[in-house]
């Protein structure tokens, strides 16, 4: 129980987790700071995602902020007060690599500002569902740094070099519709539907065969990192693994028998 002098907002958890099986929703929870991605928030986020990833009942995860902001970037106040050597050895940026280990499909629900580290966080997800109010950008060069949590790499892969250079070097923002046309966003939805639609997409994803989903996600993720021949080889290996699963037998049989499949994770 809080005392009369305590600040309940300051004492609140950095992320909120809600399970509505077979999906879970993770919400960034620093509203006063526009969900600035401080080190404690990033640690809490990675811990929550890792725990959900280990729960086989959770087959898709939605990651969101609130209707006004997904995340407005890194915690600039914290960075400004940090010694450069301490920053280099803090492990803050390296913690972001943990996102690559999340095998459960991860869906970003973006409404409002999605800037800097927020944009990098959304790009690290598998799908981005955006409200028509969403704005994406990488404004780091305006404060003397560069995108350092994947922005210079993932943005190029998502929208191409020319537009990525425009966004990063000028600091301009992409609205939801331009982001969708460029390939950064999968779907744009009505302002009031951003979270509901992302959760609906997550339930659709969760209804598919879980082993096949993870193998497909892995193959798509590797497509940007390897040449076509290597990618096709990886795809075939993933196909053979999926085909050997009991879930494949169940899915194929259910299709022939015109019934809904029951997945067993085997």
Image (cartoon, rainbow, N blue to C red):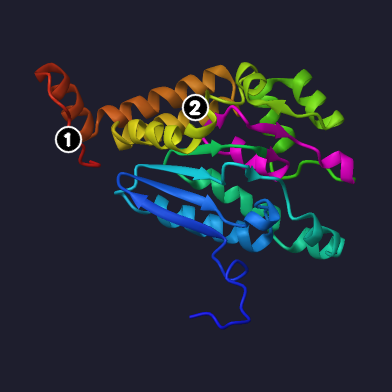
The residue labelled by disc 2 is 220
Give the quarter of the image for residue 87: bottom right
Q: Which residues are magenta?
A: 114-143
Q: Position of residue 100 (x, y in %)?
A: 54, 43
Viewer-closest of 263 and 75? 75
How many residues crowd around disc 1 within 10 Å: few (fewer than 14), some, or many (20 or more)?
Answer: few
Q: In the image, is residue 248 above or below residue 263?
A: above
How many residues crowd around disc 2 within 10 Å: few (fewer than 14), some, or many (20 or more)?
Answer: some
Viewer-closest of 170 and 105? 170
Give the quarter of the image for residue 124: top right
The residue located at (29%, 33%) in the rendering is: 207
The residue located at (40%, 31%) in the rendering is: 201
Disc 1, SS: loop
The residue located at (86%, 39%) in the rendering is: 141
Q: Position of residue 123 (x, y in %)?
A: 61, 35
Which label is found at residue 94?
A: none
Q: Position of residue 11 (x, y in %)?
A: 58, 71
Side of 57 relative to 229 (left or right): left
Residue 24 in the magenta stretch? The answer is no
Which label is found at residue 262?
A: 1
First in residue order: circle 2 vs circle 1: 2
Side of 142 relative to 164 (left or right): right
- The CA span between labels 2 and 1 is 25 Å
- Answer whether labels 2 and 1 touch (C-beta < 8 Å): no
Disc 2, SS: helix
Q: In the image, is residue 162 above or below residue 78?
A: above
Query: Which residue of the protein is positioned furthest toward the left in this rendering?
Result: 257
Residue 126 in the magenta stretch? The answer is yes
Q: Position of residue 243 (x, y in %)?
A: 26, 27
In this view, the mark in front (2 or 1): 1
Q: In the image, is residue 226 above or below residue 120?
A: above
């Amino acid at each position: 129980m809080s005392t009369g002098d305590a600040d309940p907002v300051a004492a609140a958890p950095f992320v909120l987790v809600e399970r509505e099986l077979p999906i879970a929703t993770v919400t960034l929870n620093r509203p006063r700071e526009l969900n600035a991605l401080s080190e404690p928030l990033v640690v809490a986020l990675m811990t929550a995602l890792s725990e959900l990833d280990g729960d086989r009942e959770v087959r898709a995860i939605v990651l969101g902020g609130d209707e006004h902001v997904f995340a407005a970037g890194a915690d600039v106040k914290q960075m400004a007060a940090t010694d450069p050597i301490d920053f280099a050895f803090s492990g803050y940026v390296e913690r972001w690599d943990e996102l690559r280990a999340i095998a459960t499909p991860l869906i970003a629900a973006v409404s409002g500002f999605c800037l800097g580290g927020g944009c990098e966080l959304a790009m690290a997800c598998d799908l981005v569902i955006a409200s028509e109010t969403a704005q994406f950008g990488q404004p780091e060069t305006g404060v003397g740094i560069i995108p350092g949590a994947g922005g210079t790499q993932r943005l190029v892969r998502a929208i191409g070099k020319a537009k990525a250079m425009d966004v990063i070097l000028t600091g301009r923002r992409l609205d939801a519709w331009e982001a969708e046309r460029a390939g950064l966003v999968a779907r744009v939805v009505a302002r009031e539907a951003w979270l509901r639609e992302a959760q609906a997409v997550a339930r659709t994803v969760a209804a598919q065969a879980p082993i096949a989903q993870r193998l497909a996600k892995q193959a798509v993720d590797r497509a940007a990192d390897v040449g076509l021949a290597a990618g096709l080889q990886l795809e075939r290996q993933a196909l053979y693994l999926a085909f050997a699963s009991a879930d494949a037998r169940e899915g194929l049989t259910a299709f022939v028998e015109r019934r809904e499949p029951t997945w067993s994770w085997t």
